[in-house]
Amino acid sequence: MVVTCLTFSLPFSILLLVGCFDAVPVELDEAALLDGTGPLGALLRVVLPAARPGIAAVAMYAFMTAWGEALFASILTSSGSRTLAVGLREYAAESSVHWNEVMAASLVVSLPVAAGFLLLQRHLVRGVTAGAVR
């Protein structure tokens, strides 16, 4: 399951992060190098805080993609180790759907994604250079 999630979310995540790091002004990196930090220090102290909104957005995208993945999970997992997205289908029978149970389980399944958005909200709202210019 990990390999399938990486196969689908990693290329798009890399594409998004390249655009995010390209949006960070090169002058910030050069200023950090002139102030005496090394390349690793400039990356950790200047570039990563400036790219924090993009990193947060990519992290939420990758988490949501892996959390709601049902196609490969239904094929690659057994009945003892299924994911929550696949387990939601168990509430639907051939002749009826237990809507009360489906809605309650859907709420429980969506809570981690909502909690992730609440935790990363301040990073998603900031602009790209707001974390670097202080």
Image (cartoon, helix red, strand yellow):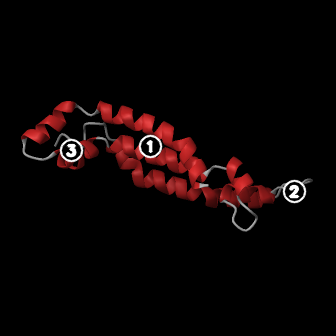
Q: Residue 81: x, y in percent?
A: 69, 65
Q: Which residue is mark 1?
A: 58
Q: Is residue 46 left or right of residue 34?
A: right
Q: Residue 63: x, y in percent?
A: 52, 51
Kindly identify which numbered label has been placed on residue 46.
Answer: 3
Image quarter hosting the N terminus: bottom right
Residue in the picture at 90% in, 53% down: 94
Q: CA distance from mark 2 to mark 3?
A: 55 Å
Q: Nearer the viewer, mark 1 or mark 2?
A: 1
Please say if the residues under marks 1 and 2 sit with CB atoms less than 8 Å apart. no
The answer to whether one can see residue 89 in this image is yes
Within 10 Å of disc 1 (Cα), the crowding (few <14, some 14-19, many 20+) is: many
Residue in the picture at 49% in, 57% down: 115
Please tell me which residue lies in front, 49 or 118.
49
Kindly identify which numbered label has been placed on residue 93.
Answer: 2
Looking at numbered disc 3 in the image, what kind of residue is underneath it? Val
Please tell me which residue lies in front, 54 or 82.
82
Q: Residue 40: x, y in percent?
A: 21, 48
Residue in the picture at 18% in, 37% down: 29
Q: CA distance from mark 1 to mark 3?
A: 19 Å
Q: Residue 101: x, y in percent?
A: 75, 61
Please say if the residues under marks 1 and 3 sit with CB atoms less than 8 Å apart. no
Label 1 vs 2, first from the N-terminus: 1
